[in-house]
Image (tube, helix red, strand yellow):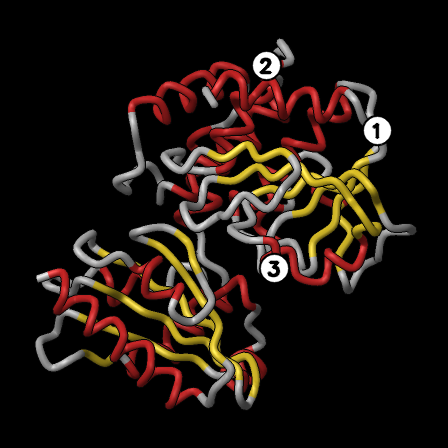
Amino acid sequence: MTWDRRLTAAANFIRGRDDFLVVSHVQPDGDAISSTVATAWLLDKLGKKYAMYNDGPVPSRLGYLWNSGAIATASTGLPQKAYRNVIMVDCADFARAGGARDWFAEGAEILNIDHHPTNDGFGLVNLLRFEAAATAEILFDLIRTFNLPFDADSATAVYTGLLTDTGGFRYSNTSAAVMNIASRMLNAGADGPGLADRLLERMTMGQMKMIQRALPRLAFSDDQRIGWLWVTTDDLSETGAKSEDLEGLVNYPRNIEGVEVGILFKQIGSDAVKVSLRSAGLVDVAAVSQQFGGGGHVRAAGCRLSAPLEEAIRQVVDATRKALEEAG
């Protein structure tokens, strides 16, 4: 099916229904929240009823996004009912919605909008484009399908998703198409310098404290091609840091010259560990993550292990080492 036909199918899903639940993945990042609000903005312009929900807290640094304060969470407020019409954005698989799935009515019909190559097309309608740099890039095309002009609110949402998922337009997914969209969003009212300062330059005290905790633990494989860090639940509680303060930590080992894969291990329980992997390009970290039930992109992926921290580190580093050996 051509991209235009897929866009038409997604547009028809929205046109033919009303009263939507819009959800993104647990532990949401910039693309997840910006795609959520961009979708809500579209529904609002079309006169559709909707609610937004995420199983985790909305990162405070994204509070400037249009209507982000209306995103219900497990801690701030739950949906008032179950929904038959669901739009899932930036979810690499169905399980990534987490507890939001409890608010899907039996037989709910799903519009699945995503850019992760590991997405298996779980929706009734699937608007998937794996070469897209961010789900926000797909939302740009969808909004244009309805011939709606971008305003400062929608432009800021799309620009935010692009900015964060391309690492400030530095990663290999920064295509000419991405830069063209970014330019159009700037013309529509997005504050490029202001967003770059807020999202890329500023650092919370929690982030600094977690960097101080994690960097002394930096470890490497014997050939120094794999580097990793780890943080514990005690680190978060003792420093007062939030999960969002860990964003960017995985880049410290990855950015070292000669390191092919950087890994961050985050303990989330006595026998549970969340893992983030970043690749220089030689290793497909999405394939490594899939071995543990996760997924993502070739260069950026994640998974979760039900294991003590030390065991999780051993398993993932061993799997990464094997993938590196096979890659050459």
Please, what secondary structure does the residue beneath circle 2 have? helix
Residue type marked 1: Asp
The reply to whether the C-beta atoms of the residues labelled 2 and 3 are less than 8 Å apart is no
Specify whether residue 145 is in view: yes
Residue to which mark 1 is pinned:
18
Q: Is residue 86 left or right of residue 189?
A: right
Q: Which of the two marks, 2 or 3, is nearer to us in this view?
A: 3
The reply to whether the C-beta atoms of the residues labelled 3 and 1 are less than 8 Å apart is no
Please, what secondary structure does the residue beneath circle 1 have? loop
Using a 10 Å C-alpha cutoff, classify the residue at mark 3 as few (fewer than 14 neighbours), some (14 to 19) or many (20 or more): few
- Give the camera-side residue of 319 and 190: 319
- Above or below for 295 versus 112: below
C-alpha separation, residue under disc 3 versus residue under disc 1: 24 Å
C-alpha separation, residue under disc 2 versus residue under disc 3: 29 Å
- Above or below for 99 versus 187: below
Image coordinates of residue 259 in percent, x first then y, are: 16, 65
Q: Residue furthest right?
A: 80
- Give the camera-side residue of 124 and 304: 124
Residue located 72% across and 62% down the image: 99
Q: Earlier in the sequence, mark 2 or mark 3?
A: 3
- Above or below for 188 versus 314: above
Kindly identify which numbered label has been placed on residue 95.
Answer: 3
- Give the camera-side residue of 65 and 171: 171
- If the image is split into quadrants, where does the C terminus sit? bottom left
Kindly identify which numbered label has been placed on residue 145.
Answer: 2
Q: Is residue 193 left or right of residue 16?
A: left
Please, what secondary structure does the residue beneath circle 3 have? helix
Residue type marked 2: Thr
Using a 10 Å C-alpha cutoff, classify the residue at mark 2 as few (fewer than 14 neighbours), some (14 to 19) or many (20 or more): some
Specify whether residue 59 is in view: no
Image coordinates of residue 288 in percent, x first then y, are: 32, 65
Kindly identify which numbered label has been placed on residue 326.
Answer: none
